[in-house]
Image (tube, grey):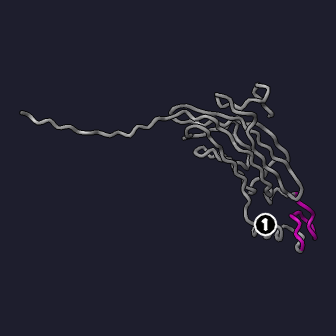
Amino acid sequence: GAQRSVGTCRLPLRAAFAPAGLRYPAAEKVVENDVESLPPVPRAGGGLGLAGPSDGGGETARLFRSLLPIVRFEAFPVVDVGTVDRFEITPSLPRGMSFNEKTGRISATPRHRFPASFSHTFEVYGYNSAGMTACRILLEVIGGSWNLVTLRVSTVGVPDATGIAASPEGSVSDAG
């Protein structure tokens, strides 16, 4: 008779789960605002500049700030179930802040001007091939003295089954 050949084929089985439980753990950091956003002060001999201790202008202030390390604000998302391949945020973040669509990271550097005070909610969406998850975050920028601002990000409410953060009363909250 004829010989039979038996072969084995192994295929990796990967199940994709819809992501769920998107949130941003509370993050807060004090950062220095852009040196160019400092208010101008009268210079000795006329003109306007940033006050420095010995030159009456901005050169000392700029040199001092250039020697300091750049303090960066960063907030990273957490997903309880599944993975996220792509993130979106709406509306766009204010000038001076950035959103990484691959990682969901929200960041800011002190090289850009911030409003003196700002509080607004944003919707963040996370997608993969099996579905999506979402959360609502609150971004606060609180102006302070000495050209410092406090940046704060937190998830609003508790994510429900759809991932949208709802207030404790069960209605979707919107502070902005």
User: Which residue, given by chain and number where applicable, does mark 1 sit on?
Assistant: 65
Residue at horizontal 64%, vertical 36%?
21
Which span of residues is magenta-colored? 39-53
Residue at horizontal 76%, vertical 39%?
138
Crowding near pointer 1: few (<14 within 10 Å), some, many (20+)? some
Residue situated in front as seen by the camera: 126 or 78: 78
- In the visual, does 162 lie left or right of 37? left
Picture coordinates of residue 16, whole percent (x, y): 49, 35
Q: Amino acid at mark 1?
A: Arg
Picture coordinates of residue 169, whole percent (x, y): 79, 26
- In the visual, does 152 lie left or right of 132? right
Quadrant housing residue 121: top right
Q: Is residue 46 magenta?
A: yes
Picture coordinates of residue 162, whole percent (x, y): 64, 28
Above or below, 85 against 166 in this view is below
Residue situated in front as seen by the camera: 50 or 148: 148
Picture coordinates of residue 68, whole percent (x, y): 76, 67
Residue at horizontal 78%, vertical 29%?
168
